Amino acid sequence: MRYTVTWLPGVESALASIWTRAADKQAISDASNRIDRLLAVVPLSIGIARAGSRRLVLGPLEVVYTVSVPDCLVEVIYVAETL
């Protein structure tokens, strides 16, 4: 089953800000693209379950997301750069 992956508008802005500040912009782009691909196919098999959400660290990014199985929807609700 494929899931539609969406990023909340504020989270998209945060990702853009991370990319703008990054010394290695390609690494940020690669990580965000890989996160999108993984969340589209195996969102419940990756990351660590938290209260109502999941956390995935895929350096140099960390995301928190929710999954709605009935809607086949993944929503990224938080993004940060890993240290």
Image (spheres, grey):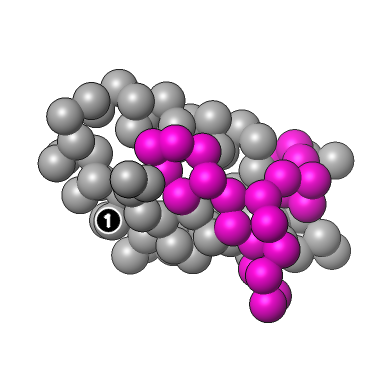
48 drawn magenta: yes
The crowd level at tag 1 (other Cα within 10 Å; few <14, some 14-19, many 20+) is: few
Circle 1 SS class: helix
Residue 15 at x, y percent in the picture: 31, 49
69 in relation to 44, above or below: below
Screen quadrant of the C terminus: top left
Viewer-side residue, 71 vs 47: 47
- Residue that appears at 67% across and 70% down: 50
Relative to 48, 55 lies left or right: left
81 in relation to 28, above or below: below
Q: How many marks?
A: 1
- Residue that appears at 65% across and 36% down: 38
Q: Amino acid at mark 1?
A: Ser
- Outermost residue on the top side: it is 26
Viewer-side residue, 36 vs 49: 49
Screen quadrant of the N terminus: top right
User: Could you tell me if residue 3 is visible in this image?
Assistant: no
Residue 62 at x, y percent in the picture: 46, 50
Relative to 28, 63 lies left or right: right
- Residue that appears at 68% across and 40% down: 40
User: Quarter of the image holding residue 46?
Assistant: top right
What residue does disc 1 label?
13
Residue 45 at x, y percent in the picture: 79, 46
36 in relation to 76, above or below: above
Relative to 16, 21 lies left or right: left
57 in relation to 74, above or below: above
Magenta residues (range): 40-62
38 drawn magenta: no
